[in-house]
Image (tube, rainbow, N blue to C red):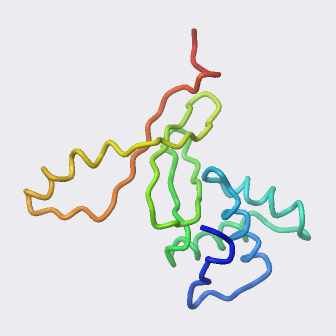
Amino acid sequence: MEKDKFVWPEGIKKTKLRKKVIEILQNAKFPMSAMEILSAVKEDESPVWISTIYRILEIFAEKDVIIKTSVIENGTAVYELNKHEHTHYAVCIGCHKIIPMENCPIHAFEPKMLENDFHVLGHKLEMYGYCKNCYPN
């Protein structure tokens, strides 16, 4: 999503810090933790508390502006801008690197689910293992 195409959600006050969080997520190549977002904000802003970042992220998640994903392996939540397309991730259990997958293996299962009177609207998939740098030899 390009900067100029972002539509500010109705009902959310446009503050300098909230705009900065959106800008950080727009420029992120991978989902980011609240601590990573806080570090990026602190580069430009006056002191900011992590609790403030979490409140902003929860508001954005409630309004479907961002997608919150819990990385099961270490319990960390990561956030990314909701581009209304889905991406699945492989998560390295060594260094916690998040690697986007190029395809969606779940689509092969959806027709069988539809036959059972269940209509799929979305899904998430995370795979865990080791990246090439952390793989034990």
Residue closest to the eye, 92 or 53: 92
The location of residue 8, given as percent across then percent down, is 62, 83
Q: Which of the image's four quarters has the N terminus?
A: bottom right
> For residue 47, what is the image quadrant?
bottom right
Residue closest to the eye, 136 or 50: 136
Residue closest to the eye, 59 or 101: 101
Q: Which of the image's four quarters has the C terminus?
A: top right
Q: Residue at x 58, y 76 (%)?
A: 59
Q: Residue at x 21, y 46 (%)?
A: 109
Q: Residue at x 65, y 72 (%)?
A: 55
Is 93 rendered above or below residue 63?
Answer: above
The location of residue 100, given as percent across then percent down, is 52, 43
Is 109 rendered above or below residue 80?
Answer: above
Is 93 rendered above or below residue 135?
Answer: below
The location of residue 27, given as percent across then percent down, is 70, 60
Q: Residue at x 57, y 13 (%)?
A: 136
The location of residue 31, given as percent across then percent down, is 60, 53
